[in-house]
Amino acid sequence: MSSTVELKTARLTLLIDPAKKAAFEQLCAQQDLTPSQVVRQLIRDYLMQHGVSFTPSGARPPVAEGPPKRRTAPAAKARPAR
């Protein structure tokens, strides 16, 4: 399993045969994993298998290569004459 921590979550609801669900939950428990952990890993693997890239929520976006951009100070606002 990946060690990436995803900070935001969204719910995925699916319908499954009750016997298959029970077997899946039992197998997950035997492996000391939650069903959610296994499903998230399956989704990550499926995305990788099909060449789909994503940035996990909560992860910092990649830093652009090259020299840092110069920041210029904002122009001072002219004050009205009194």
Image (cartoon, helix red, strand yellow):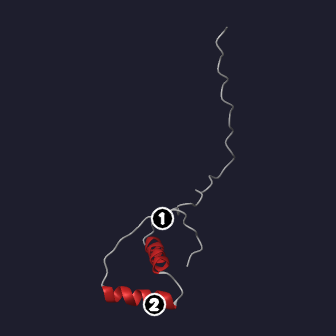
The part of the image, by quadrant, that contains residue 71 is top right
Query: Which secondary structure, mark 1?
Result: loop
First in sequence: mark 2 vs mark 1: 1
Question: How far is mark 2 from mark 1, CA to CA?
Answer: 24 Å
The part of the image, by quadrant, that contains residue 6 is bottom right
Q: For the residue carrying disc 1, how many other residues have a C-alpha within 10 Å: few (<14), some (14-19), or many (20+)?
A: few
Quadrant that contains the N terminus: bottom right
Lateral position of residue 14 relative to residue 33, left or right: left
Q: Are marks 2 and 1 in contact (CB under 8 Å)?
A: no
Expressed as whole percent of the image width and height from the top left, the position of residue 11 reads: 41, 67
Measuring 66% from the left and 15% from the top, which residue is drawn there?
Answer: 79
Query: Which secondary structure, mark 2?
Result: helix
Compared with 64, 8 (above or below) is below
Q: Which residue is mark 1?
A: 9
Q: Which residue is mark 2?
A: 27
Dot 2 amino acid type:
Leu
Quadrant that contains the C terminus: top right
Dot 1 amino acid type:
Thr
Q: For the residue carrying disc 2, how many other residues have a C-alpha within 10 Å: few (<14), some (14-19), or many (20+)?
A: some
Between residues 79 and 2, which one lies in front from this camera angle?
Answer: 79
